[in-house]
Image (spheres, rainbow, N blue to C red):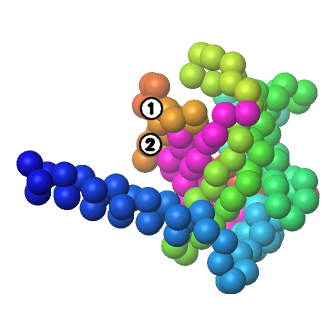
Amino acid sequence: MKAVRLHHAATIALGLSAALLIDTPTAVAQISVKAVFEKYNLLGTFAWDCSKPASMDNRYYVHRAINTDFVQRDQMSGPTTRDWVARIERAAEVKPNELAVSATFTGRTMGKDLDSKPSSGLWRLEPNRLLQWEATIDGQKVIHDGKLVSNGFQLPWASRCGD
């Protein structure tokens, strides 16, 4: 019984230590969200097929820097139809050509309307294109291994459209 309690206490202590390390500001300067997007040439418009207009079958994504700390990402399914908006608050290179992002999500997904819910994701990058590889919104996994969890749809790469 005592060993079990010590094990749980040690697990909790390790978890709290990890949380504190993640959230504690450090003296090391962190690169801004805008700078990460600029480094990977991710500001601008991306689409599944830039030669066709935005539609339910051809999503467009617009990335614009709000300031150095935030980038706004809009998903468009029509010329003036925005499905959702994500306010990206953190972006960090996980490994070469892979970014982890976290954001506040507002819009319709998973059959419900969400307002300012936490989201996170992992993007695979190649020159002038990106693929959403993982995504979680409001604690629910919506993309896994580049596929929509709801129906298995393989997401296509979103390519940079003309400037």
Q: Is residue 115 above or below residue 147?
A: above
Residue that mark 2 sits on: 144
* Residue 75 visible (yes or no): no
Where is residue 105, by image quadrant? top right
Q: Which secondary structure type mostly characterizes the magenta part of the structure?
A: strand
Residue 43 rendering spot, x and y as whole percentages: 82, 59
121 drawn magenta: yes
Q: Are marks 2 and 1 in contact (CB under 8 Å)?
A: yes
Q: Is residue 115 visible?
A: yes
Q: Secondary structure at mark 2?
A: strand
Which is nearer the N-term, disc 2 or disc 1?
2
Residue type at the position of mark 1: Val
Question: How many neighbours does mark 2 have within 10 angstroms: few (below 14), some (14-19), or many (20 or more)?
Answer: some
For the residues labelled 2 and 1, the Cα–Cα distance comes to: 6 Å
* Residue of label 1: 149
The span shown in magenta is 116-136
Q: Amino acid at mark 2?
A: His
Q: Is residue 51 magenta?
A: no
- In the displayed structure, 22 sits above or below 88; it is below
Q: Is residue 162 left or right of residue 117?
A: right
Q: Residue furthest front?
A: 2
Picture coordinates of residue 129 (x, y %)?
Answer: 67, 58
Tell me the quadrant of the picture where the C terminus can be found.
bottom right
Residue appearing at x 11%, y 57% in the figure: 3
Which residue sits at x=36%, y=61%? 13
Q: Secondary structure at mark 1?
A: loop
Count the numbered circles shown. Answer: 2
Q: Residue 130, which numbered label? A: none
Note whether 19 is above or below 38 in the view shown.
Answer: above
